[in-house]
Amino acid sequence: EADIYQTPRYLVIGTGKKITLECSQTMGHDKMYWYQQDPGMELHLIHYSYGVNSTEKGDLSSESTVSRIRTEHFPLTLESARPSHTSQYLCASSRERGTDTQYFGPGTRLTVL
Amino acid sequence: GEDVEQSLFLSVREGDSSVINCTYTDSSSTYLYWYKQEPGAGLQLLTYIFSNMDMKQDQRLTVLLNKKDKHLSLRIADTQTGDSAIYFCAESESGGSYIPTFGRGTSLIVHP
C-alpha cells in the first residue's frame, strides 16, 4: 500500500485565486513528480524533483511552481488560477535506485470558474 | 524523444481474455510497466518486467515483451467487470536521473 497523500481531493475556486495543492509521502522517496491529466486520460509531466532543493520543469509548460524543502513534501502552487487550469493533478514518488516504480496519490480534481 | 504508444480503447465481454498492446521507441529501456487507474483514483502499479525478460506471469496477468520489435502486451485472463479501468504502459531506464515515459492509456470496458 502506497503512503502518498494529496489534499484537497476536490477544489472549486474562482479565477485569479492563489492555490496550493499539497502532496506528501512517508516512504522516504527521493524523486517526486506532478502530472496534469486530461479528461481524455493522457498524463502530462509538469514538474519533478530529484530530492531536497531540486526542482525541474517537465514536458508540459505550466504556470505553476513547486518547492521541495523537505523530502516528504512537494507542494504545487498556482499564483493566479484560470479556467484553463481546470484538470486532474496527480502527484507521484519513486526511489532513485531500483525499479523506479512510481507510487501515485489519489489526485486533486481542480475546477476554476 | 522517447515515445510510448497505446490504442485508446478496448471492449471485451466478461470472461474473455483482454490483450492490451503497447509499443515504445527507446532501445535503452530497462524497465517496462503496466499501471491501472480506476475512476477517481491515481495510478497503481500492476506489474513490471525487466528488458532482459520475455514473459512474466502473475495470477491472471501475463506480460509479454518482444524487445526486437519494442512491443509490450498485457493479457488479462477471465476478464471481470472490476477490471474496467484505464491501463497505462510506461518505460524507464536504469539510473537515478531518468524520468519514466507513459503512454496515453487504454480504456478497457468490460461488458456482461
Image (tube, rainbow, N blue to C red):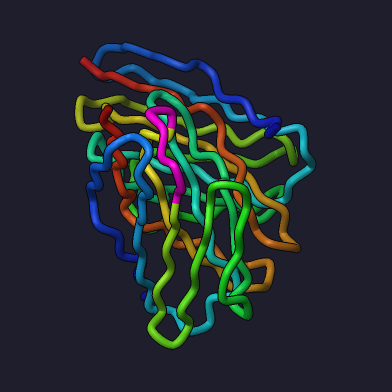
**Residue A48: image x %, image y %?**
54, 51
Q: Does residue A54 appear left or right of residue A72 in this picture? A: left
**Residue B28: image x %, image y %?**
53, 82
In percent of the image, x 55 and y 40: which residue is there?
A: B44
The quarter of the rendered structure image containing the C terminus of chain B is: top left
**Residue B49: image x %, image y %?**
60, 65
Q: Does residue B109 appear left or right of residue B90 in this picture? A: left
In percent of the image, x 33 and y 17: which residue is there?
A: A17
In percent of the image, x 65 and y 73: which residue is there?
A: B94
Q: Nearer the viewer, residue B102 or B19?
A: B19
In percent of the image, x 47 and y 17: which residue is there?
A: A9
- The question of residue B78 being in magenta is answered with yes
Q: Nearer the viewer, residue A1 or B12?
A: B12
- The question of residue A104 being in magenta is answered with no
**Which of the 4 quarters of the picture holds residue A1?**
top right
Question: What range is drawn magenta here?
Answer: B76-82
**Which of the 4 quarters of the picture holds residue A93?**
top right
